[in-house]
């Protein structure tokens, strides 16, 4: 063991020397490249002006149909695709972008929300003296600084605490983290430091106290990934790119090059998913930036081409706020689990050796959620703290499209960096990489496209180029929203951190509440600062479905699926008015959004948890007690209760609850979805609560409170607790 440590130490010092040399050599260069002046400089060098208003989707579709030929056509509206569109259009290239779903509807909205250089990759670079890994970390740290600069309203530095449980690990990890700071150079967000055991427990009291030695704190970044992706897309649109969501590419168009006689990709045939209209879009260069779907587009070009994408799945869960640190994110040595201020825990699936089906890996499973919860205690949380399955507020699965480099001799080796490949017919494919380096990936892609297709354009202009909402944003902007419009402080802060300087546009269309305070800003649900005006504004930002609104224009589905479901009827009503939906269309949107919440955002986990407890593990005395409580509502001895039964009991104790609220309360427990709660379902609920599978059930609280206060006329609380699924 001692020898092992010595060897590790030697490698660490050797690698540290390498990192020191390169870090210091780049220090002055970094300082010159980054600074507040870069933003102004970047905007001034862009050869096309930014439009004052965002074009409508209809105008964008018209531009796609009427433009004779684009210079660049990008397939894919994720971070990389939108980054390519922004890079191309700001170089003066005539640019188009097509996305078959919504912007950021795939991997780009299902990340850990971190902007990071990659501490683990630096460790590997040092231990293996791998210069390529080192360059990847250096590039990511450079891009981290740029992201924080160009969208300060959507991103911020994040302190991450690494608990240490062995004395020898303290100097070992401290030295490694200090090298991470050194490689960042002048772009280091804040210097890392060591916390004593007492200070670590003060910041994160839920840590396991026994054997805790201390903790190390270092800094990375955090961002609102879906809104960041959208900001890139909207910025590209305002610079003149014809960007359209819900536009599916059906096939690639090809023409024969008269000089070489070879077939060349010259555009695409596509379909407007919303109207069904099909049309062709011609382009000198077509870029494939479709993430996990990379190979499907490559096979449109050549059916015989081998797959290069090997998706790696990761499950994320959202927990109530009381589980998090006071201000830190908390990571583990393996970096497989991380608690973030987004109330996020991630389990990274070690699936790089096994091909996954993109279509089937978007659903979080109960077993995966349980696996995360079981591992939490192993990685440092106190055994005193009882973490329950019922505390999970939302769950989703994200897919990272790892790739093998088709240009490499070793085609079986997974590339941790991004890969740009150009086919014989001229299709440019960008794959791999990570969220943090989207801009560098886009730059490399457009550089390759310009060279391969002889396009006339200058160098990239996106370094330091501010995204929509950043120009006049300041940390105190929300105060003006409160003072000028009479918004709640929490709502104003949310608008400022979501829309930046465009928050004023949202505030202008906010409805009057009719209350003394707040003056404007009707909330969609009471617990979250999302307001109805955001739905109207979201339509202007190309939202076309209720799912777009709850998951990407707002993040409600990612924070609490039950709250998202409650907000849906109002969201659908507002969108229906803005988009002239028929009653049938509104019904379809409501059902589609509920299905999305059920399967993709973890609502199914709730039903599965109740079904898992179908063998009711209650002692006879508890069963009788709960049956008695149930019969208090089921006076007719039907074997089930409905809204009318609940209303009758509540009226007898002079309590009034809105009918739609009661419907939501019963629907949480109604597994059969037949509008009634049967005795067996109620017993399953109480059994699941005892096991910790379910917490915060409003029906259970309502029935218990009604029983206890039947003759005391005491009000019954029906607000959701911190509990979740």
Image: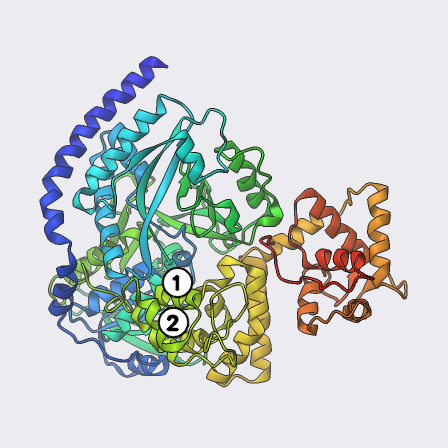
> Which element type, helix, strand or loop, lies under badge 1?
loop
Q: Establish if 314 lies above or below 277.
A: above
Q: Would residue 479 be found to the left or right of residue 581 on screen?
A: left
Q: Residues within 10 Å of mark 2 (few under 14, many from 20)?
A: many
Q: Residues within 10 Å of mark 1 (few under 14, many from 20)?
A: many
Residue matched to label 1: 104
Instruction: State the residue in front, 266 or 239.
Output: 239
Q: Can you tell which mark lies on residue 59? A: none
Residue drawn at point x = 30 percent, y = 52 percent? 436
Instruction: State the residue in front, 111 or 523.
Output: 523
Q: Earlier in the sequence, mark 2 or mark 1?
A: 1
Query: To which quarter of the image does residue 330 belong?
Result: top left
Residue matched to label 2: 482
Q: Would residue 156 be found to the left or right of residue 258 on screen?
A: right
The location of residue 337, given as percent across then percent down, is: 45, 40
Q: Residue furthest right?
A: 636
The location of residue 387, given as percent across then percent down, is: 58, 41
The location of residue 680, given as percent across then percent down, is: 80, 54
- Please identify, in this view, whether the residue under mark 2 or under mark 1 is nearer the observer: 2
- Quadrant (top left, top right, bottom left, bottom right) of the N terminus: top left
């Amino acid at each position: 063991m001692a020898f092992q440590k010595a060897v590790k130490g030697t490698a660490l010092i050797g690698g540290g020397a390498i990192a020191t040399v390169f870090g210091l050599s780049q220090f002055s260069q970094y300082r010159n490249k980054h600074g507040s002046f870069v933003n102004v400089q970047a905007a001034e060098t862009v050869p096309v002006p930014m439009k004052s208003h965002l074009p409508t989707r209809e105008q964008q579709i018209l531009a796609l149909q009427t433009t004779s030929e684009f210079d660049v056509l990008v397939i894919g509206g994720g971070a990389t695709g939108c980054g390519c569109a922004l890079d191309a259009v700001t170089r003066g290239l005539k640019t188009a972008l097509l996305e078959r779903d919504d912007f950021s509807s795939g991997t780009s909205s299902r990340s850990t929300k971190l902007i990071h250089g990659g501490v683990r990759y630096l460790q590997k670079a040092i231990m293996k003296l791998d210069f390529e890994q080192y360059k990847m970390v250096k590039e990511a740290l450079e891009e981290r600084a740029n992201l924080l600069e160009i969208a300060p309203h959507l991103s911020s530095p994040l302190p991450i605490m690494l608990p240490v449980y062995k004395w020898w690990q303290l100097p070992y990890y401290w030295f490694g983290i200090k090298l991470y700071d050194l490689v960042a150079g002048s772009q280091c967000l804040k210097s890392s430091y060591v916390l004593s055991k007492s200070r670590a427990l003060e910041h994160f009291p839920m840590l396991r106290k026994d054997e805790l030695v201390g903790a190390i704190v270092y800094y990375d970044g955090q961002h609102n990934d879906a809104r960041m992706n959208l900001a890139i897309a909207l910025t590209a649109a305002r610079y003149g790119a014809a960007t359209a969501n819900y536009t599916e590419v059906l096939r690639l168009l090809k023409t024969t090059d008269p000089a070489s006689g070879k077939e060349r990709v010259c555009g695409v045939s596509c379909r407007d998913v919303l109207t069904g209209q099909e049309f062709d879009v011609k382009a000198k260069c077509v870029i494939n930036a479709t993430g996990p779907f990379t190979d499907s587009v490559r096979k449109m070009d050549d059916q015989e081409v081998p797959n290069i994408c090997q998706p790696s799945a990761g499950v994320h869960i959202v927990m109530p706020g009381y589980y998090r640190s006071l201000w830190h994110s908390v990571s583990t040595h393996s970096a497989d689990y991380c608690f973030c201020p987004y109330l996020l825990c991630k389990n990274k699936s070690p699936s790089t050796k096994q091909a996954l089906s993109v279509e089937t890996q978007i659903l979080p499973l109960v077993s995966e959620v349980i696996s995360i919860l079981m591992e939490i205690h192993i990685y440092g949380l106190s055994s005193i703290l009882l973490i329950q399955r019922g505390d999970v507020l939302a769950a989703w699965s994200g897919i990272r499209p790892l790739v093998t480099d088709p240009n490499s001799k070793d085609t079986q080796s997974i590339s941790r960096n991004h890969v740009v490949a150009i086919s014989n017919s001229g299709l440019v494919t960008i794959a791999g990489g990570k969220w943090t380096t989207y801009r560098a990936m886009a730059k490399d892609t457009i550089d390759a496209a310009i060279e391969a297709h002889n396009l006339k354009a200058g160098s990239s202009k996106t370094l330091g180029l501010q995204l929509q909402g950043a120009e006049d944003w300041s940390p105190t902007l929300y105060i003006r929203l409160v003072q000028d419009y009479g918004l709640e402080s929490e709502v104003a802060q949310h608008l400022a951190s979501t829309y930046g300087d465009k928050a004023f546009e949202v505030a202008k269309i906010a409805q009057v509440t009719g209350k003394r305070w707040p003056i404007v800003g009707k909330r969609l649900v009471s617990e979250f600062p999302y307001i109805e005006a955001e739905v109207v504004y979201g339509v202007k930002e190309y939202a076309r479905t209720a799912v777009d609104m709850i998951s990407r224009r707002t993040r409600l589905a990612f924070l609490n699926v039950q709250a998202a479901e409650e907000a849906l009827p109002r969201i659908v009503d507002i969108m229906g008015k803005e988009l002239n939906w028929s009653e049938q269309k509104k019904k379809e949107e409501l059902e589609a959004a509920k299905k999305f919440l059920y399967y993709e955002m973890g609502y199914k986990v709730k039903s599965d948890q109740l079904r898992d407890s179908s063998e009711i593990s209650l002692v006879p005395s508890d069963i009788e007690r709960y049956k008695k409580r149930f019969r208090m509502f089921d006076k007719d001895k039907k074997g089930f209760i409905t809204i009318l039964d609940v209303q009758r009991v509540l009226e007898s104790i002079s309590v009034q609850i809105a009918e739609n609220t009661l419907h939501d309360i019963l629907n949480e427990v109604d597994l059969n979805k037949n509008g009634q709660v049967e005795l067996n379902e109620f017993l399953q609920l109480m059994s699941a609560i005892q096991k910790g599978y379910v917490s915060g059930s409003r029906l259970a609280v309502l029935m218990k409170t009604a029983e206890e206060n039947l003759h005391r006329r005491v009000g019954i609380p029906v607000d959701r607790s911190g509990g979740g699924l």
